[in-house]
Every structure is written in structure tokens, then in C-alpha cells.
Image (cartoon, grey):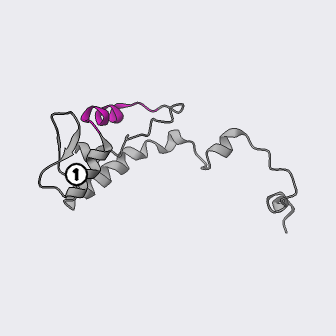
Amino acid sequence: MDPSLAPLVDFNNSPLERDDSQTSWPLDRGPEHFWQQGEQFSSVIALMLKLRLVTPKMVVGDDGFIHGKETEDDELKLWLEGLKLTSHQLDTARQKPFDTEDNDFWELKWACKPFLA
């Protein structure tokens, strides 16, 4: 066995010295590199859903919440009502600037794109 690999295999040894950034982010590059790809990826997914004609047909109700159109499946309508989303929430999520300190930054950032399309 390679001596440099021994600490990885031997559980009796102390853990390897690492700084917090290496243990909390397992990829070679930081999130600031990958987050920009989310915009293009979500655009591709939204386009594919449109081409397959599977994007849900939605309307904003009088209460301000997003509901499925009358022609949509009942299960979709129930799911959308359970989400309790407003168009304002979706617009706000789309416009949020990147923030490494905000854990809620990703919430609906790109997942809302098919809803807004």
C-alpha cells in the first residue's frame, strides 16, 4: 500500500488536516463557478418541457396565488395549491443576485423558470 494513502484507510489515525472550505464544498471549484451554469441549464429544461407540451397551464387567481387552469389534471391543481406560490415570489426569486452567505439564495432561483415561461 502507498504510504500516502495509509491515513485514509487506517481509522485509528487522526483525521486529515483540512480547512473548513474543503470539507463544506466537495468540488474542485467553488460555487461561484457553477452557479452561472444554472441559468443555461434551467433554460434548456424549460425549453424541453415546452417542446414536449408538458409545462403546466397556470393562472394567477384573485387571491394572488398560482393555480392550475380548469383544463389541467386535478392532481396538478392540488399540488399547485399546496405550494401556495405567488407570481411575486417567483419574480423575486428570479431577480435575486448571487450571495454566498445566503443559504436561501437558491430557493426557486431556476426552478421557477417553467412556471414563468
Q: Position of residue 33 (x, y in %)?
A: 51, 42
Image quarter of residue 93: top left
Residue 15 within the segment the image draws in magenta: no
Mark 1 burial class by Cα count in 10 Å: few <14, some 14-19, many 20+? some
Seen in the picture, residue 59 relative to 6 is either above or below; the reply is: above
Q: Main secondary structure of the magenta part?
A: helix
Seen at 22% across and 45% down, the residue is 117
So how many labels did they put on this image?
Answer: 1
Seen at 45% across and 33% down, the residue is 98
Residue 95 within the segment the image draws in magenta: yes
Image quarter of residue 60: top left
Seen in the picture, residue 26 relative to 9 is either above or below; the reply is: above
Q: Nearer the viewer, residue 65 or 2?
A: 65
Q: Is residue 13 left or right of residue 45?
A: right
Q: Position of residue 76 (x, y in %)?
A: 24, 54
Q: Position of residue 40 (x, y in %)?
A: 35, 47
Q: Is residue 4 left or right of residue 51?
A: right
Task: Please name the amino acid that badge 1 sits on.
Answer: Lys
Name the residue carrying label 1. 77
Looking at the rendering, the stretch of residues picked out in magenta corresponds to 85-98
Seen at 62% across and 49% down, the residue is 26
Seen at 83% across and 59% down, the residue is 11
> Residue extending furthest bottom?
1
> Residue extending furthest left?
71
Helix, strand, or loop for circle 1?
helix
Q: Position of residue 100 (x, y in %)?
A: 53, 33
Quadrant in the picture for the N terminus: bottom right
Image quarter of residue 85: top left
